[in-house]
Image: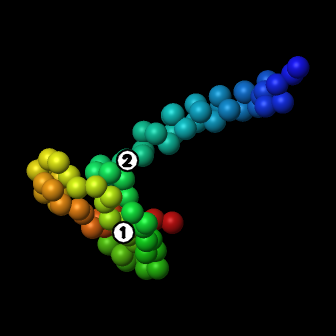
Amino acid sequence: MENPFALSDTHRQFRASLRRFADERIAPNATAAGYWGGTSAFSVDNVSPDPQTTSIYFGTLNVSTVATTPCGTSNYCAVKLTQNGLQ
């Protein structure tokens, strides 16, 4: 019996092309925010063209176990990430 979920050759080629594009164009420009335990629900504020007004806000779901985080050891964090020109 043939697998109904098997990808066609065209689909596999498209998937490989998309993976190459993501690896070469997107991944080198992506950054991550390293906050412990993941994030709570978040809010996006994108209503002004002025610098420092386009922001993403969230809270952490776990406390930090190291003192090198912005919140210190054994604290939850309220986080504001800002990117000028976020669209």
- Look at the picture and state if 58 lies above or below 34: below
| Quadrant housing the N terminus | top right
Can the viewer see residue 72? yes
Residue 80 in which image quadrant: bottom left
Compared to 29, does 81 lie above or below? below
Position in image of residue 15 (x %, y %) = 68, 32
Q: Where is residue 23 in the image (x, y as percent from the top left)?
A: 51, 34
Q: Name the residue under label 1.
A: 57
Left/right placement of residue 41 relative to residue 2 reads left
Is 57 on the left or on the right of 87, as rendered?
A: left
Say few, some or many: other residues with alpha carbon within 10 Å of mark 2 (under 14 / 14 to 19 / 20 or more).
few
Q: Which of marks 2 and 1 is in front?
A: 1
* Rendering coords of residue 83 (x, y %): 37, 63
Residue of label 2: 31
Expressed as whole percent of the image width and height from the top left, the position of residue 44 reads 45, 71
Amino acid carrying label 2: it is Thr
- Looking at the image, the residue that sits furthest to the top is 1
* Badge 2 or badge 1: first in the primary sequence: 2
Determine contact: label 2, label 1, CB under 8 Å: no
Disc 2 is placed on an element classified as: loop
- Residue at image position (87%, 22%) is 2
Q: How far apart are marks 2 and 1 (CA)?
A: 16 Å
Element type at mark 1: strand
- Residue occupying the point 63% across, 36% down: 18
At x 20%, y 52%, the residue is 64
Label disc, if present, on residue 9 of the rendered structure? none
